[in-house]
Amino acid sequence: MQAAILSGDIIASARLTDNRRSSQLSKWLREVLPTTIFEISQGDTFQLQTTVVEALPTAVRIRAHLRAAPALEGYRPDARISIGLGGMLPIGRSLSKSAGMAFERSGRGLHTLKQRPAQLLLTSDDPALDAACNTSFVLLEYLILRWTPAQAAAVEAALQGLSQQQIGELRGVSQPAIQQQLRAGGWPGIAALLAYYQTQTTLK
């Protein structure tokens, strides 16, 4: 079966104690993906499965949620995430026991992210798709690193399909304020990138 595996780790997690690191990561992932099964290892590394089409929106949403989270003793969380697309051989309900190219691509990619200009990476069997997305991720990184918590929260809500009016009502601010936050956070460009990715992966 074709699937997407997201492998990630929390950036600069050594600033958190070992016990807090694992529990906090689990809390963040449950908040952003309440119905998704994920696995955590080594305290700050996580892995989860999505459909191919939802892989990139999910990765961006995780980063938006982390960038919107309150700082912990001056630490503002973020993650590097490697997306691997390909075949998958599920074994039971455990990701750690499953296999396939999606796992191999995702795992290999995560090991290279510290040396890359962007903290998102896509690896699939389509070099053209990979090149287009990974080049765009460098520009996306520029936006993500400049998100304020309010901008990150607005982007996360937009990724859930909420309108500007709905986001404003949930957060108790005006629709024009949300519009400004989304514009400042680069949402028009992010939405265009996600639309391109989803179109390309839906066609496969």
Image (cartoon, rainbow, N blue to C red):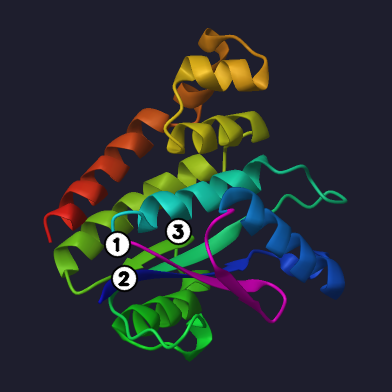
Check whether the beta carbons of the residues at disc 2 and disc 3 lie within 8 A of each other: no
Q: Is residue 87 above or below residue 177?
A: below
How crowded pointer 1 is (Cα within 10 Å; few <14, some 14-19, many 20+) is rated as: many
Q: Residue at x 58, y 17 (%)?
A: 168
Q: Residue at x 59, y 53 (%)?
A: 34
Q: Is residue 44 visible?
A: yes
Identify the secondary structure beneath mark 3: loop
Q: Does residue 96 appear left or right of residue 69 in this picture?
A: left
For disc 3, the marked residue is 118
Q: Does residue 108 appear left or right of residue 204 in this picture?
A: right
Q: CA distance from mark 3 to mark 1?
A: 20 Å
Identify the secondary structure beneath mark 1: loop
Q: Quadrant of residue 202?
A: bottom left
Q: Amino acid at mark 1?
A: Val
> For the N terminus, which image quadrant?
bottom left
Q: Amino acid at mark 3?
A: Ala
Is 47 in the magenta? yes
Residue range (magenta): 34-51
For disc 2, the marked residue is 3
Looking at the rendered structure, which numbered label has been put on residue 52? 1
Q: Is residue 17 visible?
A: no
Q: Does residue 183 appear left or right of residue 133 in this picture?
A: right
How crowded pointer 2 is (Cα within 10 Å; few <14, some 14-19, many 20+) is rated as: many
Q: Is residue 32 above or below residue 83?
A: above
Q: Amino acid at mark 2?
A: Ala
